[in-house]
Amino acid sequence: MSSSPENCDHCHLPLPPGETISSNIKGKDLYFCCHGCQAVCETIYGSGMEGFYQRTIEGDTLQPPPLFSAKDNSELEVYDLDEIQGEFVDVLGDIREIHLLVEGIHCAACVWLIEHRLANEPGVLEANVNLSVKKLRLKWDNSAVKLSQILHHLGQIGYAAVPYDPDAAEGQIKKQNQALLFRLSFAGFAAMNLMWISIALYAGADEGEFKDLFHWLGLGLATPTLLYSGYPFYRSAITGLLNRHLTMDLPIAIGASITYLYSCYVVFSGSEIGHVYFDTVVNFLFVILTGRYLEAMSKRLAVQSSQRLLDLQPKISTLITDDETSIVPIRALKEGDWVLVKPGEKIPVDGLIIKGESVVDESMLTGEFLPVAKLTGDQVSAGTTNKDGVLTVQVSQTLKNTALGKIIHLVDEAQSTKAPIQCTADRIIPWFVSVTLILSSLTFAFWVGENFEIALMAATSVLIITCPCAFGLATPMAIAVATGVGARMGVLVKHGAVLEILSSVRHFVFDKTGTLTQGKMLVSTLFSSVSVDESGSRIIKKIVPDEANIDKLNGTEKMILTLAWYLETHSEHMIARAIAGFGQQFKVNLNLNSHLNSDLNSDLSKHLSKHLSKPADLEQIKVVAGSGIRASYQGQQIAVGSLSWIRELAELSDVLYHQLDEISREYQVSGSTVVYAWLGSSAEQSLPGDGGLMAFVVEDKLREDAAEIIKTMHHQGFHLSLLSGDKQEVADYMAEKLAIEEVIAEVMPDEKYKVIQQKQQNGDLIAMVGDGINDAPALVRADVGIAMGSGTDVSIDSADVILMNGELGKIPLAAELSQATLSTIKQNITISILYNIIMVPLAMAAMITPLVAAISMPLSSLLVIANAARLRWRFKNK
């Protein structure tokens, strides 16, 4: 800690002129720029935490203390209200846990100070700081200490903390990325200008009258670039040394520094045999910063994933009080309140239906596309969509305590605890750096007795020629090529490190709906019951719905199909859309005007011809929640819906009902739904067979390549599991059809998360393949999350790998690519080591000058680049 009267003894910023703020602390006269710094410093010393100043990097400045830290604690007491904490705390009991976004954290010393200061605070149970995202996970006993007191204590030592909010976190990350972009741009500007100077020097100007001018211009450009653009590397290197850890930034800092200092030596000494390498310094920093910036941009994905989930939560609701309604924010609701949910609206809370009937789209939770019928007394969940009827819901849970809130919490928790893979190069770098420093020092010591400049040049040559460029490129170059190859094949890899993990994964867990299936409902089979046999019993006929078979339908069957098609266009139900889509295809593929059967009389022929040119004149259209839709047409009744409902309308015989029910049960086992269309007869006009019934088998079909891909992955030795929110019998049927050995069904999103976690605890590396919002926690929890490109935005944001065209066949290809990438990384590291084994002894023997070293240094990098490029040829035709 400095005692300079020019700088503040806390934040190290210059002292304001004409004002003296000082304190005598432990026998030392210390000076401060403001009363805030004075108060913070006194608090740190008073708490016995002066070790903070020993851990702060020399010459580094701190941010000024937050304004509220010097104010009265009453301003923070708003955070003690349960109504406020309810947004950020999962359980409002005595023991509470919250994530805080902390302003002012900038290094490991800040982490140490915060954790140690709070550890001594009565009532604080845990305090863990995440330096990369400036987030503090706090667990405390609310009966012993209030949150406002903890925030106040943080303010006293110079940190402003507020409950974590994704919007604020994204703003903080954006601010950091912007600062990194400024450093990158500065280095790029300097690199472009130094390029012209380098061209002039290499073209012969280093021997002419302008030699000194060019050298000084290079120095003028390189110096601010090294100080400003190189600052993050120096800071990281020094922090690593203080924590006894040799990081990748240390050789970068050493290489840049030695090269810069040697070039300065040549400029200032006027050496005739030395050369300047300012361009090497600046170009080196520019290339490394470019990679760092691209890496930093990917960190925003975690915040975006949480934000997309938060967007599913309605912000307002319609509160019912004394038969009146009012629009209120969700946070104003409490347990027991009544809310009104209109058709098409998202349900704002978890609750119980006390009035009304409807169908609800719960795909966000279950992943299943079929809407679920909801009656009075049924439970509904926040974020799901009310499709048809008006519902009155009694509130049971809001915000973070809802099923949606728990999904958001699981995603955040998994993102904060999922440890990144350590690259192979990073495991070697500490040893490599140590050996490099020792060899350079030995070289200098060996030659210094003979000639100082030779010693300096030889030692510098060792550092330059062993600069970890090849090591730095070994992993990212292979990953860059691999991600490019993957993108060309339709496999988008978000994070390069995931390729290293994926190469070791032997267990794949598949979601069912939208992953192994097509994710859309289609009509796969028709059944017709419009004719009777000699005994008067109905004949049930199975029809494959292709163009030839549709062409053979009789007039009544065509009439039912046509009216059902038009009727279902009035519904937003998933199955209705499937039937409407089938009807549209039926109309396009078949010209009924030229294929009318003889059993259809001329009047009906005219009607049907009219139907095909414009919508049918349907009247009294009515949606019956949970049952179906009905209407009248020309005095007849047309209804499409469940068998039990149609039985009531058409007064079906018990024999026919049981025959049709048996068909329904048969298809339900495979996850299909059978919907019935009934056309009732009228007094004015009779139809052949006295009306009739037709059935639509609607299903989410397996992807065409699913069976083949599963078979291929079995042959490759992968262990496969099916994880689904669907019914057990449906999941079992699917698994048996695909020969998947393990089935886990009827699981909610949080249960999927726990299943993946359990498998990881058993020692497996897990790859999860999914496409829905309900898969997001499992995708983030898994070692590798793979999302279908046709899936939801949340699943795509939560995954590490995206199959752009939704092709399952790309999964084994992605696994093969990852294995090839890891092999290439190992080859690149071997190339770099062999290069150093050959070149370092030559440099130590003073047989290589820094100029030759600078020329030779890229050779290992070029070899690494060429080897990585082989991946393109290997996967050229795949």
Image (cartoon, rainbow, N blue to C red):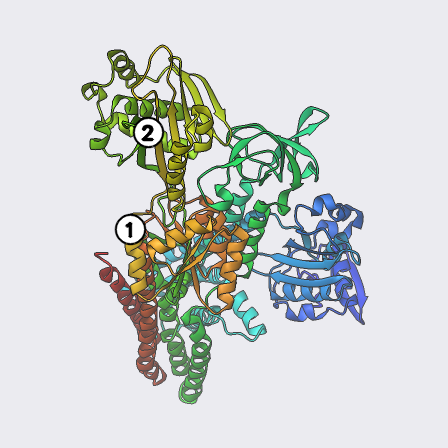
Q: Is residue 784 left or right of residue 111?
A: left
SS type, badge 1: loop
The answer to whether residue 210 of the structure is visible from this angle is no
| Residue picked out by circle 2 | 538
Dot placed on the residue nearer the N-terminal end, 2 or 1: 2
The answer to whether residue 495 of the structure is visible from this angle is yes
847 vs 382: above or below: below
Query: What is the quadrant of the C terminus in the image?
Result: bottom left
213 vs 304: above or below: below
Residue 76 spot, x, y in % from top left: 75, 48
Query: What is the quadrant of the N terminus in the image?
Result: bottom right
Q: Is residue 573 left or right of residue 309?
A: left
Of the pair 204 and 817, the residue shown nearer to us: 817
| Residue picked out by circle 1 | 705
Of the pair 239 and 183, the residue shown nearer to us: 239
The quarter of the picture where residue 473 lies is: bottom left
Q: Residue at x 42, y 83 (%)?
A: 439
Q: Residue at x 42, y 17 (%)?
A: 632
- CA–CA distance between discs 2 and 1? 39 Å
Q: Residue at x 32, y 57 (%)?
A: 710
Question: Which disc, if any, is residue 848?
Answer: none
Residue 104 spot, x, y in % from top left: 64, 56
